Image (cartoon, helix red, strand yellow):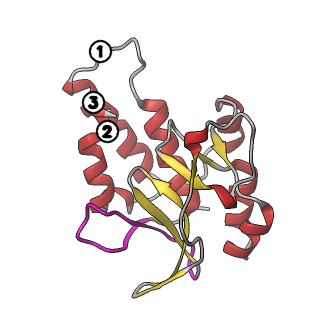
Amino acid sequence: MLVGIDWPAVMEEAEPGDLLRFRPDVAARIWPDGDGARFVTEVGIPCSNGLFRILAEFAERDPASPEKAFATWPDPEPVDTPHGRLQPLGMLYQAVVFVHLGDGTIWVSDPDSEIEYELVHGDVSSLGYLVYKFEVERPGPDERPNPYDWAEVEEIVREGMERWDSRPFESEFWTAFLDSYPML
């Protein structure tokens, strides 16, 4: 796994139901090497107020998870692309998020982008970490952030992420997301 933070601390601090975990049988099929499967079954990917939504049929359901944490997709089977076989995992913001079945990289297909499939993360821990960072660095509901506050949040998120994986902010997807982040 690319991101080597204290995941047990993240798990301890998470709101009940926020960490979306995959069913072990699904995880073993998608990540046969074990590291990715272990991550998505033990830690999970944060929902972060709906930023990530797991495919409902892949989820190890937690009754505390909000309904907005689950997405449906007409065909959850892998798709053949010019980049290799990609397995849909769920939704990320407005895009479908995939894992590459060969190397474990994370891709998106954003309907608002001219790029059909875009590489956005080196592995699933990188995805989980960035989704987590966006939520924990977001100004609180009582705060009235100004543009400078949002720029500071963006800098904190970028610095934290680039330590582990530079791919996200090289992508069109996350760059476009940052433009709308203050309004979410």
Disc marking residue 150: 3
What's the residue at 73%, 75% (across, down)? Answer: 29
Q: Residues within 10 Å of mark 2 (few under 14, many from 20)?
A: some
Amino acid identity at mark 1: Arg
Residue 44 in percent (x, y) is at: 66, 50
The residue that label 2 is drawn on is: 181
Q: Quadrant of residue 174?
A: bottom left
Residue 115 in percent (x, y) is at: 27, 72
What's the residue at 28%, 33% (across, down)? Answer: 183
Q: Residues within 10 Å of mark 3 (few under 14, many from 20)?
A: some
Q: Secondary structure at mark 3?
A: helix
Please check the rendered image and state whether residue 9 is part of the magenta-colored stretch, yes or no: no
> Chief secondary structure of the magenta span?
loop
Amino acid identity at mark 3: Trp
Q: Is residue 170 visible?
A: yes
The residue that label 1 is drawn on is: 144
In the rendered view, would you say 26 is above or below 154?
below
Which is closer to the viewer, label 3 or label 2?
2
- Contact between marks 3 and 2 (CB within 8 A): the answer is yes
What's the residue at 64%, 55% (across, down)? Answer: 56
What's the residue at 26%, 41% (across, down)? Answer: 180
Magenta span: 102-120
Amino acid identity at mark 2: Tyr
